[in-house]
Each structure stands twice: as C-alpha cells, then as structure tokens.
Image (cartoon, helix red, strand yellow):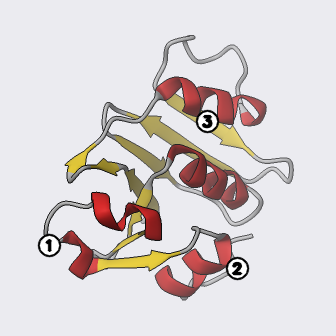
Amino acid sequence: MSYGLTLYRFVDGELSGVDIETVRTLLAAYDAAPGRAAEDSPEFWVRAPDGSEAEVSVSDSIITVERPQAGEVWKVIIGLINQTGTGVLLTDGRFLCPEVMRGHLPEGMANDSVFVPEITLEALERIAGPFTHPLA
C-alpha cells in the first residue's frame, strides 16, 4: 500500500485552481527524469538531493503527491505546499492548512481542519503521524 497526499487551495469558500507554472518552476530543480516528460505535462517525478523520490501530479484544482519516500523529498513537498498556498487532506479526513486559509474554507470545513501558522515538516509529522520512520 502506498502513501499519498492530496493538496487543495480554497479562495472565498471555493476550490481554487493551482498554477501549474508555479509548480513546474518549484519542481524544476528536482526533476528525476529531465527531458522525459512532455514540456506541458502535469506530472512530475521528483528526486531530492539525497535520492528520495515522489510523484507529483497537477490537475485544475488539486495537486497529488504519490509514494513520497522518507528523506529530503519531504522538504520539497513542504515547500510546494507553502509556495502554492495549499493545505493537505490527511488520511483521517482532517484538513491541515495555514491559519490564513481559515476564512477561505467552505462553510463547515473549519470544523474538520487543523490550523497552523505555517505548514512545516514538524507540524505534518505531529498532526498526521506517527509515521513508521521519520519523514526526513
């Protein structure tokens, strides 16, 4: 069984699109297969400097992160979350997001959300864990 994350961004109570060019720019330095993906592909194979990897896919409104391995790739993922202004749907159904997103969530969603000043690796491990191994 693999682990995955789904990232969402909300504005004025509505699901908001994610700018794929922002994602592409953020992940360019971590491209595990340069030249393999089509230039306009919404899918990315990410490899961190320590060799840990994850697959990232972008649709109009969501970013999915599949099979993130333990290691520095989690720092890349956290950077992606913060730079795109997204929150994380946790496996238990709660939504982890920065406090500034509170006023943008759909009605009632705040009841099932966990708010933090900023999404950090430590916050993700504390709220979504425990994990078998440290993430990074």
User: In the image, 74: left or right of 5?
Assistant: right
Image x and y of residue 45, in percent? 61, 36
- Give the spatial CA distance, label 2 vs label 1: 33 Å
- Give the spatial CA distance, label 3 vs label 1: 35 Å
Q: Which three-letter amino acid code belongs to the residue tagged 2?
A: Pro
Viewer-side residue, 67 vs 114: 114
Q: Which residue is mark 2?
A: 134
Image x and y of residue 37, in percent? 58, 18
Residue 108, numbered label: 1
- Give the spatial CA distance, label 3 vs label 2: 22 Å
In the rendered view, tell whether residue 1 sits above or below residue 59. below
Image x and y of residue 76, in percent? 69, 51
Residue at position x 39%, y 55% in the image = 6
Residue 45, numbered label: 3
Precedes in sequence: disc 3 or disc 1: 3
Q: Residue furthest left?
A: 107
Residue at position x 58%, y 54% in the image = 82
Viewer-side residue, 90 vs 132: 90
Viewer-side residue, 40 vs 123: 123
Count of numbered badges drawn on the protein: 3
Kind of element beneath mark 3: strand
Neighbour tally class for label 2: few under 14, some 14-19, many 20 plus, Cα within 10 Å: few
Kind of element beneath mark 1: loop
In the rendered view, tell whether residue 79 sits above or below residue 55. below
Residue at position x 39%, y 61% in the image = 101
Viewer-side residue, 22 vs 32: 22
Q: Which three-letter amino acid code belongs to the residue tagged 1?
A: Gly
